[in-house]
Each structure stands twice: as structure tokens, then as C-alpha cells.
Image: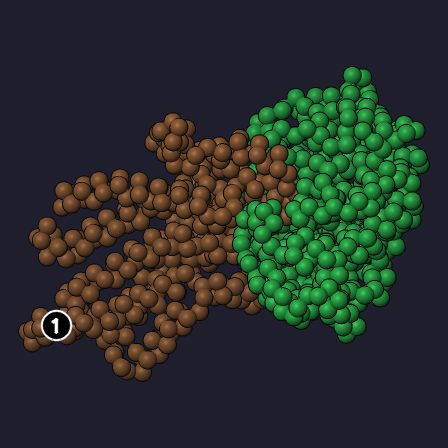
Chain colours: A brown, B green
């Protein structure tokens, strides 16, 4: 098992290099550049001046070759400078805010992590019981009603649900979470009050997916011979479900939840905006609009590491839940 | 509104530097600048103004192009050499300069530096500080690109050899110079902290409030400057500026009284509920100032090089329909020419009452469309001639409406949507027929929002339009130090721009400020980045 984990971690390196090269090239191939964004504003509303534009490109190093300098291979290109900086732990400064990329990421990552974590926990807390009930009460009125609830979760955009929640809080309950974001370490109570509303619509959306996955997975398992055997032995339904059905049915649900968590790391943008939370998603969107190359590259690298780590954790969870996986390895 | 009697202005300086109050015709209601009502009540001291801002500042440096919105965050801690009266547009008041004199030929401006003013760290304000800042506006070190570039490129020399005076020599007399120096974008930063990263960690100024703390992503806190050089000011104990990015959330916070005053919100984004904010939230007042001017820039190629074709677009394009369909309930200020209309609080623009009767601007398009089609016919432009309509991604929602309205004139319009910087890149390369654009008016002067686009050497004149009499009018109006003469010249300029029709103004977007009934004497202003961010005379009736 340890060998498996180590080999998965070693695979990080080529994956990260691949992602780094890819995002580096994609950003620079895309039309528009950061010097223009700075000069004329992200919306193109400012004033353009050719001389200043050229000066700015030079100062930002954008006049250097992108990948390789044919006249001086391996040195002086934008990629080589950036990659060597990453290796040294110097991720550069944001071209927009002129602040260190690592500092900005470290300030914002906890907020996004917290939203995603709470959303996935909520999704599991809602989705798994719903899925179980739907499976056990298959084709009953309860099943139909719960399926409608889960389909509604899939159908309603989370930003719309979030806006409805916000308006309901204001117009019905005459209450809003305190303004001014507080970090968890500063003030856990206020922080949770602020973050939970962003996690709720996402949790509802994801719970619908989990509920449907749980339902179909449990139904598949319940049709197996060993379940029939367990029932034939006279075991109670609750025991059959908890001891034999659920553990086997959970594998795809755990995979799904892990992937949802990884996906949410970059998918909380709208919630961060509506609920005024300074997270990484909104920073990424702003950086892309601004062509803030170091910032985009830094955030994407962090997301890549999170996705890779999540996959390793999913593998570990498999082994923990299913003895067959452990023995197979 | 001014409590300090020493803020009297020298008549000559006033005439030379500003449009003058006489040029303003203030319409009733919240369409012209003014202030939140105080009804003659005595100002109350104390309290903390809870202000909503959209997000963290990108930069706190007004002289850095990244900091074009920095005034929202640093306006309360800075002063200017001279400033526009926040309660009376066009009136220039002394501030850190006690007075200014202009030589007979208009090329030398001498500012007398106020003595006894201290920075928040106790060091004295001197002419060296003033020179430091004007030099940054004149020759900004890249990438600190001055937002006042058009005006300051006329500077020939800045001399601060006498600590009590600052002498600025201009290459030629300029009516735009004094109003430009009075803009918040020419705020005074300390010359003893030249590293802006160091300054940004603990910003200081000479202004009414001191910077207390800044928590990124959360808020900025300001406290009263106990040694402010204007006696008795400010009234507030402090300001708490909280970042609320979402307009619906800001609406909720206003409704629940969590914030006292909301910074400008784009009403196009607020529609439909916030456009009626005053009806929806008892006690709330609002003011719709200008956002940016929405234009069509016509390229100098193909059939568009023929003035008749451009005039056909100017005449036939239904501006009202474009606002209604493309911009929904948030609406815009219409009709407008290139300068902001005088009957909406502007200093130089053709009035809405006049424009509403003019071909192209009037709401009934029957005659205009017929004339547009005739012009196309006269120019030999066949029906459904293809046009490329270039639009930034942030304006993409309005593009189909624009294309449809161009098609009604007789074109076959292809929409090209690219993001902002790429759109500028493409426009720079001339790869478009019509380029839509929003142009921010930093302040109400042609140097701020017209020259770059229409002058033959204008930085944003990508189509290289070269109309000698427009160039001449631009020069003449800038050299006209008499406001009446300047206004007449600017009228001619606007009429020529309308006639040439390569810059076709559609409307001005609106930015809406909203405040609680207890916020008193807070100025509201036509432009978002005006002098309303000082808060030195604002008070709370609580």
C-alpha cells in the first residue's frame, strides 16, 4: 500500500510539469496580453500609447521568447525564468496587484477550501440518506418525491439558488451574515455564519448528484447474491444494509465526492462573489481576465496539486473501505 | 457648504481654471450633482461612516494606471494642491496651495504652498512634495502611467526651488491644466516615501482621515486626523469601508442598515430591483452619476471612409432602442453628445433639450432612417453590405441589439466578441468596421474623454482619422482661457464630431450611489471618480 502511495506521489512530478507547460503556453497563445490589460484596463476602457506599451512589455519581460530563445537556448525565455522561479519557491509577483503570488494564494486558499469542504460534507449528509431512502423505497411515492427534489437540485443553477437564499434572508428574516469577512482562525463563529450560506447552494446541487449515485449504486448492490444470502440467513434489513450493502455501494459515491471537492476548488467563484468571500476562485477569474500570467499559473498549479492529492486520498479510502482492494495490492 | 471662509477663490484664477457655476443649469431631482440633504441643520460630530466598496483596491497609487479607482480608497487620507468644490462642479478651491496665479500669457502657473500643513507622520508638507507629485503626473515612471497624460504632456518645467512656491511652466496656455490639477487623480503623496510598496503598507497623507488598518478581502478602517489643518473638520470619527462585491448583497446590506452609503453601483447590473431602490427601501436616497460613455468608433476603411455612410449610421442608429433592449432597466443617460450635457450637471456638453430635437438623437427614427437609407444609396453602398462589429466580452450582451439596429439601416453585421485587452489589440490593428467601446470620463473636460479619440495624434484614434479643423478646434478650445469662448469652441467641436461621425456617442452609462437618510452633507457627483471621496464635511444625523 505504501508503495502504491509513493508511486502515485512520484507521478505528481511529470503531471505537474505537463500542466505547467500546458497552462503556460495556453495563456500566451490566447489573444491579448497583460501589458495591454494594464495600459487600457481589463475592459479596454483606458488610453493606449504605443511607446508606453512597448516599455511596459519590456519591463514585464513579455518581449522575451516564450518557450526557448533560439539564440541562447535554455536561458532568458519567459518559460525558463518562470519555471526556475517556481523551483526556487519564487512564484513571482502578480502583474495586476504587484503582490507575491504565493502570498495571495495562501491568503485565499483557506476560504475556498472551507467552502468546498463544507459543501461536500453537506452534500454527503443530505445526499447519502436521500439516496438510501430512494433505493430502499424504490418506485414508491417517497422515491418519486425525493427524485423530484434531487432533479430540482440538478436543474436549478446554484447562483440562482444563492440569490434566492440571500433575498429570503433579507426580505423574510431581515437578517444577513455580518459584513466583513472573518477568517476561521480569527472568529470561528462569524466565519461559519458567513461561509455556510455559500456552501449551502453548492451542497444542495452536489447532494442531488450524490443521492442519485447512491440510489443506483445501492440498488445494484441489493441485487447481488450475497445480499440475498444475508437475508436468507435471517439478518435484519438494517444489518444487511449497514454491514453488507452500504460499504460496497459507497465506493463510487466516495469517488464522486472526492472529484466534486476537487472540482469545487475552482468552482466557487459565483458563491464567493455573492457572499463576499475572498476566495481563490474569484481571484482566478480576475487573473484570467487581466492576463495575470504568474497568478493564473500559480493558482492552476495549486489546483492541480489538490486534484492529484484528492485522487490519492480516494485511493486510500477505497483500501480502507474495501478489503478486496487492500488484498489486491 | 464650505465652512472654512478662507476657501475663497481668486476671481481671475477661477475664470481661468473652471467653467464657472454660471455654466451649470441644475435640473431638479437627483440628476445633477449636489449633496445629501442637511436642511440647514448644524453638523453633528462623531460616528463612523459605514461605506461599501466593491472589492480590494488593485493599487493605492493614483499615478499608476492600475490605481485608476484608487481615489475610492485613498480620497479620505489625501489632499490636493487645489480641488474642485465637491458641492459645486466647476468651482476650483485652494487646498494645499493657498492660491495660484497664472501669467499673462497663460503659460506659467505659480502655486503658493500653504504653510504649517503636516503629513500624518508629522513631517511638514512643502513645495518639494507638490513638485514630486506633479512630476509623477508629468513623467510617470513606467509602468506608473499617469491617468492625466493628455494634460500633463503640455508641461515644460516644474520648479520647486522656493519651498513656499511651486512654478509650473506650460508649453502653451491650457484651459484644461488647472481643472486637471484639481482632480482627485492628482492627489498629494509624501515625497519622503517614494517607494509606493512601502507607502502602501502604511499609507499617509495630509487629509482629514488617517489610515488605521486594512484587512485584505475584508475592510479598510480610517480614523479622524486629530491635527487636520482645516479647523473643525472632519465631523466623522472614522470610516469603515467594507468590500461587498455582489450588488444584491449590497442591496440587502442597505436595506438592513448594515451600511450607510454604497459606492457607485452599475444600475445596468442592478435592474430591476435596485433601479427603484428609493421606493423599495424607506429612507434610502440615491443618485445616478455617470459611468462611462458608450460609443461606436467607425473605422476609416471601405465604404466607411465615405462620410455619408458614417452619417447614415449616426442618423439611423436607434439609440433609445439600443438602451432599452441592450441595457434593460438600468438605462443610461440619453441623448448625449461627446461631452456630458449641461442640463445633467455637465460643464460643456450640448444640452439634452437641444439634442433631443436633432437628427440622429431624436427618439422618432422615421425621418432619420429614411435619410440614412438615402445617404447609403447616394454613396453607392449596396443593401446588406457586410460590417464587422467588434465588441469587448464585457459588452457582449448588448451586441445583438447593436447588430440588429445596424442591419435596420441596411447593413449585414457580423459580431466579433473578444475580451477587453484583445479587443483593444484588434482595434489597434484596424481589424474591424465598427468598434464599440465605453470610455470613462475621469473628469468633465475634453482632455479627459474626447481628445484621445478624435485628435489625429490621439492615443486611441486607432483608425487614424485626420480632420484638420477638429485638431484645430481641440487646440483652440484648450488655449481659450475665457470659459465663454471655450464653451463656444467646444460647441463647434461637438457639432463637427457629430458631422464627421467617426465617433458616434450613444449614451452614458449610470453609476448609482445610495445612502441612508442619516447621512448628511455627503456630496454626490456626476463622475464616479470625483471629489466625493474626501468625506471631510459628511456627518451622521444619529
Against A218, residue B480 (above or below) is above
Q: Can you tell which quarter of the image residue B505 is in?
A: bottom right
Query: Element type at marker 1?
Result: loop
Q: Nearer the viewer, residue B514 or A17?
A: A17
**Residue found at x 48% / y 62%:** A159
Q: Residue at x 25, y 51 (%)?
A: A311
Residue B180 in percent (x, y) is at 77, 38
In the drawing, does residue A54 fall left or right of residue A116?
right
Chain ID at mark 1: A
Task: Kindly identify the residue that appears in the image at 60 percent across and 54 percent down.
Answer: B432
In terms of depth relative to the viewer, which is nearer, B508 or A59?
A59
Relative to the observer, which residue lies in front, B341 or A216?
Answer: B341
Q: Nearer the viewer, residue B256 or A51?
A: A51
Q: Position of residue B115 (x, y in %)?
A: 81, 23
Task: Name the residue: 48% across, 50% down.
Answer: A285
Residue B355 percent location from the top left of the image: 83, 62
Tell me: residue A235, above or below residue B496: below
Residue labelled with disc 1: A224
Amino acid at each position: 500500500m505504501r508503495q502504491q502511495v509513493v508511486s502515485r506521489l512520484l507521478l505528481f512530478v511529470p503531471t505537474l510539469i505537463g500542466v505547467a507547460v500546458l497552462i503556460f503556453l495556453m495563456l500566451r497563445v490566447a489573444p491579448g496580453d497583460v501589458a495591454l490589460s494594464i495600459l487600457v484596463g481589463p475592459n479596454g476602457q483606458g488610453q493606449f500609447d504605443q511607446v508606453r506599451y512597448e516599455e511596459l512589455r519590456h519591463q514585464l519581460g513579455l518581449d522575451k521568447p516564450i518557450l526557448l530563445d533560439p539564440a541562447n537556448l535554455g536561458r532568458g525565455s519567459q518559460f525558463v525564468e518562470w519555471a526556475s522561479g517556481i523551483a526556487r519557491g519564487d512564484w513571482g509577483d502578480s502583474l495586476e496587484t504587484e503582490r507575491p503570488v504565493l502570498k495571495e494564494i495562501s491568503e485565499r486558499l483557506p476560504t475556498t477550501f472551507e467552502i468546498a469542504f463544507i459543501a461536500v460534507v453537506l452534500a454527503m449528509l443530505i445526499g447519502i440518506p436521500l439516496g438510501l431512502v430512494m433505493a430502499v423505497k424504490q418506485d414508491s411515492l417517497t422515491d418519486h418525491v425525493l427524485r423530484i427534489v434531487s432533479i430540482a437540485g440538478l436543474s436549478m443553477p446554484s447562483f440562482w439558488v444563492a440569490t434566492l437564499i440571500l433575498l429570503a434572508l433579507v426580505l423574510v428574516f431581515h437578517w444577513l451574515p455580518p459584513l466583513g469577512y472573518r477568517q476561521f482562525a480569527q472568529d470561528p463563529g462569524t466565519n461559519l455564519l458567513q461561509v455556510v450560506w455559500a456552501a449551502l447552494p453548492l451542497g444542495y446541487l452536489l447532494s442531488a448528484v450524490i443521492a442519485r449515485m447512491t440510489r443506483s449504486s445501492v440498488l445494484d448492490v441489493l441485487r447481488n447474491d450475497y445480499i440475498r444470502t444475508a437475508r436468507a440467513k435471517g439478518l435484519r434489513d438494517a444489518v444487511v444494509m449497514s454491514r453488507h450493502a452500504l460499504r460496497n455501494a459507497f465506493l463510487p459515491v466516495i469517488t464522486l465526492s472526492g472529484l466534486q471537492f476537487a472540482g469545487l476548488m475552482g468552482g466557487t467563484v459565483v458563491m464567493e462573489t455573492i457572499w463576499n468571500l475572498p476566495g481563490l476562485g474569484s481571484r482566478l477569474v480576475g487573473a484570467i481576465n487581466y492576463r495575470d500570467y504568474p497568478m493564473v499559473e500559480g493558482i492552476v498549479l495549486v489546483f492541480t496539486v489538490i486534484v492529484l492529492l484528492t485522487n490519492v486520498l480516494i485511493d486510500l479510502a477505497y483500501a480502507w473501505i474495501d478489503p478486496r482492494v487492500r488484498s489486491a495490492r | 457648504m464650505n465652512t472654512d471662509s478662507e476657501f475663497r477663490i481668486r476671481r481671475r484664477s477661477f475664470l481661468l481654471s473652471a467653467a464657472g457655476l454660471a455654466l451649470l443649469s441644475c435640473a431638479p431631482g437627483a440628476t445633477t450633482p449636489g449633496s445629501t440633504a442637511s436642511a440647514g441643520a448644524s453638523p453633528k460630530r462623531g460616528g463612523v461612516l459605514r461605506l461599501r466598496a466593491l472589492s480590494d483596491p488593485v493599487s493605492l497609487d493614483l499615478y499608476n494606471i492600475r490605481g485608476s479607482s484608487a481615489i475610492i480608497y485613498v480620497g479620505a487620507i489625501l489632499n490636493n494642491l487645489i480641488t474642485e468644490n465637491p458641492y459645486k462642479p466647476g468651482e476650483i478651491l485652494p487646498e494645499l496651495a493657498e492660491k495660484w496665479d497664472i501669467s499673462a500669457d497663460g503659460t506659467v502657473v505659480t502655486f503658493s504652498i500653504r504653510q504649517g500643513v503636516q503629513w500624518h507622520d508629522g513631517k511638514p508638507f512643502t513645495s518639494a512634495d507638490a513638485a514630486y507629485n506633479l512630476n509623477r503626473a508629468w513623467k510617470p515612471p513606467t509602468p506608473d502611467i499617469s491617468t492625466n497624460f493628455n494634460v500633463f504632456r503640455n508641461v515644460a518645467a516644474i520648479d520647486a526651488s522656493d519651498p513656499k512656491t511651486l512654478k509650473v511652466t506650460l508649453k502653451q496656455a491650457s484651459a484644461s491644466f488647472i481643472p486637471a490639477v484639481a482632480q482627485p487623480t492628482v492627489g498629494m503623496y509624501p515625497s519622503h516615501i517614494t517607494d509606493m510598496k512601502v507607502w502602501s503598507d502604511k499609507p499617509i497623507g495630509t487629509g482629514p482621515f488617517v489610515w488605521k488598518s486594512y484587512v485584505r478581502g475584508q475592510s479598510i478602517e480610517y480614523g479622524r486626523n486629530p491635527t487636520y489643518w482645516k479647523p473643525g473638520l472632519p465631523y466623522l470619527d472614522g470610516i469603515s469601508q467594507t468590500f461587498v462585491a455582489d450588488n444584491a448583497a449590497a442591496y440587502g446590506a442597505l436595506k438592513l442598515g448594515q451600511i450607510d452609503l454604497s459606492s457607485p453601483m452599475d444600475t445596468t447590473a442592478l435592474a430591476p430591483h435596485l433601479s427603484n431602490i428609493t421606493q423599495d427601501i424607506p429612507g434610502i436616497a440615491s443618485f445616478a452619476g455617470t459611468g462611462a460613455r458608450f460609443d461606436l468608433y467607425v473605422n476609416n476603411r471601405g465604404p466607411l471612409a465615405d462620410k455619408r455612410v458614417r452619417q447614415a449610421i449616426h442618423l439611423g442608429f436607434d439609440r433609445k432602442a439600443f438602451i432599452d433592449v441592450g441595457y434593460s432597466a438600468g438605462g443610461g443617460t440619453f441623448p448625449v453628445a461627446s461631452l456630458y450635457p449641461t442640463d445633467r450637471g455637465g460643464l460643456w456638453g450640448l444640452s439634452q433639450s437641444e439634442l433631443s430635437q436633432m437628427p440622429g438623437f431624436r427618439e422618432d427614427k422615421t425621418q432619420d432612417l429614411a435619410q440614412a437609407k438615402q445617404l447609403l444609396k447616394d454613396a453607392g453602398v449596396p443593401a446588406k453590405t457586410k460590417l464587422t462589429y467588434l465588441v469587448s466580452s464585457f459588452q457582449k450582451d448588448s451586441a445583438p441589439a447593436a447588430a440588429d439596429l445596424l442591419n435596420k439601416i441596411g447593413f449585414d453585421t457580423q459580431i466579433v466578441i473578444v475580451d477587453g485587452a484583445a479587443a483593444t489589440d484588434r482595434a489597434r490593428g484596424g481589424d474591424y468596421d465598427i468598434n464599440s467601446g465605453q470610455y470613462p470620463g475621469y473628469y468633465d473636460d475634453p482632455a479627459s474623454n474626447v481628445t484621445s479619440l478624435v485628435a489625429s495624434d490621439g492615443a486611441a484614434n486607432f483608425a487614424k482619422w485626420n480632420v484638420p479643423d477638429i485638431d484645430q478646434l481641440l487646440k483652440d478650445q484648450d488655449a481659450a482661457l475665457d470659459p465663454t469662448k471655450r464653451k463656444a469652441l467646444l460647441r463647434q467641436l461637438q457639432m463637427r464630431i457629430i458631422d464627421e461621425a467617426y465617433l458616434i456617442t450613444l449614451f452614458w452609462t449610470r453609476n448609482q450611489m445610495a445612502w441612508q437618510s442619516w447621512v448628511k452633507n455627503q456630496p454626490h457627483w456626476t463622475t464616479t471618480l470625483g471629489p466625493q471621496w474626501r468625506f471631510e464635511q459628511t456627518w451622521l444625523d444619529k
